Image (tube, helix red, strand yellow):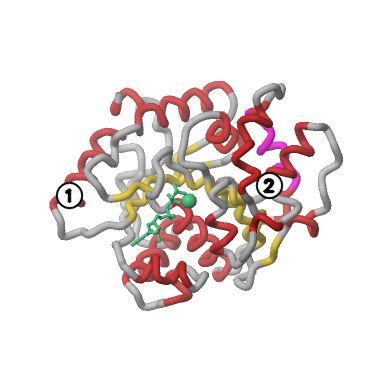
Amino acid sequence: MGKVLGIVNRKGGVGKTTTATTLSYLLSKEGCRVALIDFDGQRHTTKLCGVAAPEQLTVTIYDILKCIVMNEKLPDSEDYMIRTETGVDLIPANNKLDNFDKLMCDTDFAEYKLKEFVDTIKEQYDYILIDGMPKMGTAMINVMICCDSLLIPVQSETLAVEGMAEFLRAFHRIKSHANAGLEIEGILITMDNERTRVSKRVKAQLQQALGERVRIFTNSIPRSIKVPEAVEYGMTICEYEPDNPAAKAYEKFVKELMGNGDKDTKNTGKGIESTSEHIA
Ligand SMILES: Nc1ncnc2c1ncn2[C@@H]1O[C@H](COP(=O)(O)OP(=O)(O)OP(=O)(O)O)[C@@H](O)[C@H]1O
Ligand SMILES: [Mg+2]
């Protein structure tokens, strides 16, 4: 059974898509079978994976979820799965996904629809990564219910902790009532500049707010102008400039994530029962 990992943060622009696409590339390079679900109507992941005109796609994650809601037969995987050059299987999105809340509003068990789909592909992959939307609500709950764990990219900036309390309350609610196995994989600091005071302060604030039991990955991702530049060429930084410090940091982070890299032994990421009290 594949591990289902949601790359989520209610904040926008923190590096979710960059992390989801880079992680999928690196895990695939490690020989893992990887599916990447674009679960954001901005469909940045879909574009980054080389789909030039996502609006022309006929079967996207939205259409799959619509079939589930309507109790219709799911489309065949070859109708929606896009095998990328890097060997990752993309389940694409386009702006139809902006209608997700409307689709779900009169639906029974709306929070379980993404899980219903993911369960149908779980056996075929080692990792299923989900690039989430930057907001709370039914979409985020769908991700939390179908995932084994959540990876939270956090931009190294002054207001990084802001909004985390609501997120963690939702996490605890889902863990208590709907998905007991859900864990927080950890916090990945992105767009970091370790030498600055802001960076040190953000890490300290996050650790204090989240408590010692939430892992903040030792390997943060430095800010580099080459990361957005790579996007222009439809590549991850690891393909575009493998020796770039951000590319190297993503490689080290993946090793840490898979359990064979530099680890911060203090933080296990497990059992964070009291986390929301820390931060509230
Ligand atoms: N390490 C980095 N250094 C410099 N720029 C970066 C880095 N990581 C991401 N970026 C840039 O920051 C912007 C936001 O990143 P990204 O799209 O991954 O965030 P996001 O959380 O997915 O945003 P959204 O919430 O809108 O989906 C992009 O232009 C991306 O290229
Ligand atoms: Mg994104």
> Which residues make up the magenta segment?
111-120
User: Is label 1's Cβ within 8 Å of ligand 1?
Assistant: no
Instruction: Tell me how many marks there are.
Output: 2
From what the image shows, is residue 116 above or below residue 107? Answer: below
Q: Which residue is rendered at x = 54% and y = 63% of the image?
A: 48
| Residue behind mark 1 | 198
Pinpoint residue 127: horizontal percent, then vertical percent: 60, 54
Residue highlighted by disc 2: 61
- In the rendered image, the vertical position of residue 234 relative to residue 11, given as above or below: below
Q: Position of residue 210 (x, y in %)?
A: 31, 34
**Residue at screen point 42% across, 25% down:** 169
Q: Secondary structure at mark 2?
A: helix
Answer left or right for 80 relative to 135.
Answer: right
The mark that comes first in sequence, 1 or 2, is 2
Marks 2 and 1: in contact by CB < 8 Å? no
Instruction: Determine the residue positioned at 47% across, 36% down.
Output: 135
**Amino acid bearing label 1:** Val
The quarter holding residue 107 reads top right
Residue 82 vs residue 125, the one in the foreground = 82
